[in-house]
Amino acid sequence: MRQINVKGENILNVPNLISLYRLLVFPVILFMALTGRENGFVVLLCISLVSDVLDGNIARLFKLQTNFGAALDNLADIFTYAMALLGLFVFKWTDIEPHAWILYLFLGVFILSYIIAFYRFGKIPGLHLYSAVSAGYIQSIFFFVLFVFGFYTWMYYLAIAWGVIAYVEKILVLLRLDDVKIGVKGLYWLMKNEKKQIL
């Protein structure tokens, strides 16, 4: 594969191409949702959710992680999960509405994390904390099960509550960091490193 370098990073690799696919398919998924084509929406959304799991794992396994790739993946995540949330409102709202309070809480914390990131650093935070990655996996499974098999209350609360915890941690990490960088595992590891530097 031909190398394309941005700031010394080879950005033309398989994980970045997978992330790019998720960005490019976003308008198609949006069209499916807005025109009520649930079957097409579900198929394309599920492909995006599976590819979201693949790109990060491939990047870590083959040591293809880059700052550009982290930002691209994060942007693709935003669009993918925006479409999944839109699907909740368009196709599954009768199931979700009685439990909507925790979804609104998650959205509030999620949006706040990006406001803080832009205020402090002026860019999309591509941190990929362990809690956020695991929350992404759980939420992907929830969305897949919801659209293919149906609504399970316990799975909904698990997925959304874990997302709230993950983004609260992300906010705390963003408030402690001097700059957004890849490889930050979580608040515990960040505080541990800070202690080492003091000693």
Image (cartoon, helix red, strand yellow):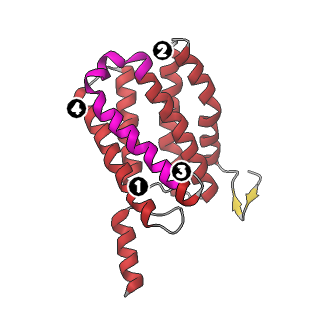
Residue at 35% x, 24% y: name it: 146
Type of secondary structure dominating the magenta stretch: helix
The kind of residue on which mark 4 rests is Trp
Marks 3 and 2: CB-CB under 8 Å? no
For label 2, the residue is: 38
| Residue 126 visible in the current orientation | no
Does the segment drawn in magenta span residue 115?
A: yes
SS for dot 3: helix
Residue linked to disc 1: 170
Residue at the spot x=52%, y=30% of the render?
47
Q: Earlier in the sequence, mark 3 or mark 2?
A: 2
Eyeballing the image, is 36 above or below 182?
above
Nearer to the camera, 89 or 32: 89
- Disc 4 to disc 2: CB gap under 8 Å: no
Q: In terms of image quadrants, where is residue 170?
A: bottom left
Give the structural element (helix, strand or loop) at label 1.
helix
Mark 4 and mark 3 lie on one chain; the one further toward the N terminus is 3
- Residue 137 point in image, percent of width and height: 39, 42
Q: Amino acid at mark 3?
A: Ile
Numbered badge on residue 58: 3
Tell me, yes or no, whether the two marked residues, 1 and 2, touch with CB atoms within 8 Å.
no
Mark 4 vs 2, N-terminal side: 2
Q: Name the amino acid, label 1.
A: Lys
Inter-mark Cα distance, 1 to 2? 33 Å
What number is the disc on residue 97?
Answer: none
